[in-house]
Image (cartoon, helix red, strand yellow):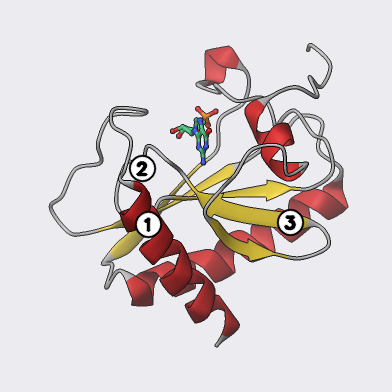
Amino acid sequence: MPSYYPQNIFAKILRGELPCYKVYEDDKVLAFLDIMPRAPGHTLVLPKAPARNLLDVKPDDLAAVAVVSQRVANAAMKVFAADGITIQQFNEGAGGQVVFHLHVHVIPRQAGVAMKPPASAKEKPDVLADQALKLSAALKS
Ligand code: 5GP
């Protein structure tokens, strides 16, 4: 497997070199909205420590990401009045991974509504800002 590439987009977001619509942050984890959501509220949960994907992440960081993914999922159920949550996590190009810093997709779902294809359309900035505010407030309550 190739080694971690520190110039990937999510590494730049983690270093504050690129912006994001932040949903949650602690000492080990950052969660922010996907700018091309497959459904409203589509959130990405990342370890702060460098990890290419599931195959090389340290167990402690993986555990922290799993715990925050569950918290984001429960918050998203309320904020988006969701009927369910889809969790996705891709590893290496053959596994569907496009950005090579480990991330878990937390995708709120409505019954009978299909997900959009991956990276099909950029959401409007004001919509993302509003959703991030609501999700982060729900995560604090
Ligand atoms: P992967 O296939 O690697 O699991 O998914 C990468 C995800 O990152 C895709 O869902 C894509 O929409 C999202 N994405 C790509 N570029 C950016 C970006 O600059 N900011 C954010 N927030 N998401 C991005």
Q: Is residue 54 visible?
A: no
Q: Position of residue 32 (x, y in %)?
A: 55, 53
Other-residue count near label 1 (Cα within 10 Å), few / some / many at <14 / 14–19 / ≥20: many
Residue found at x 28% / y 67%: 82
Mark 3 secondary-structure assignment: strand
User: Type of residue at label 3?
Assistant: Val
Q: Which residue is mark 2?
A: 37
Instruction: Count the marks.
Output: 3
Crowd class of label 3 (few under 14; some 14 to 19; many from 20; radius 10 Å): many
Helix, strand, or loop for circle 1?
A: loop
The percent coordinates of residue 45 (x first, y second) are 61, 51
| Rendered residue at 50%/21% (across/down) | 96
Say if mark 1 contacts mark 3, CB within 8 Å: no
The answer to whether 117 is drawn above or below residue 21 in the figure is: above
What amino acid is labelled 2 in the image? Pro
Q: CA distance from mark 1 to mark 3?
A: 18 Å
Could you tell me if residue 53 is visible in this image? yes
Comparing 56 with 133, the one in front is 133
Left or right, 106 with respect to 41, comes to right
As drawn, the label of residue 41 is 1
- Residue under numbered circle 3: 29
Residue 54 sits in quarter: top right
**141 sits left or right of 134 in the view:** right
Residue 80, picture quadrant: bottom left
Task: Please tell me whether mark 2 sits on a helix, a strand or a loop.
Answer: loop
Amino acid type at image mark 1: Gly
Whether label 1 touches label 2, CB < 8 Å: yes
Q: Residue at x 27, y 73 (%)?
A: 81
In depth, the one of 18 and 85 nearer the eye is 18
> How many residues crowd around disc 2 within 10 Å: few (fewer than 14), some, or many (20 or more)?
many
Q: Position of residue 40 (x, y in %)?
A: 30, 54
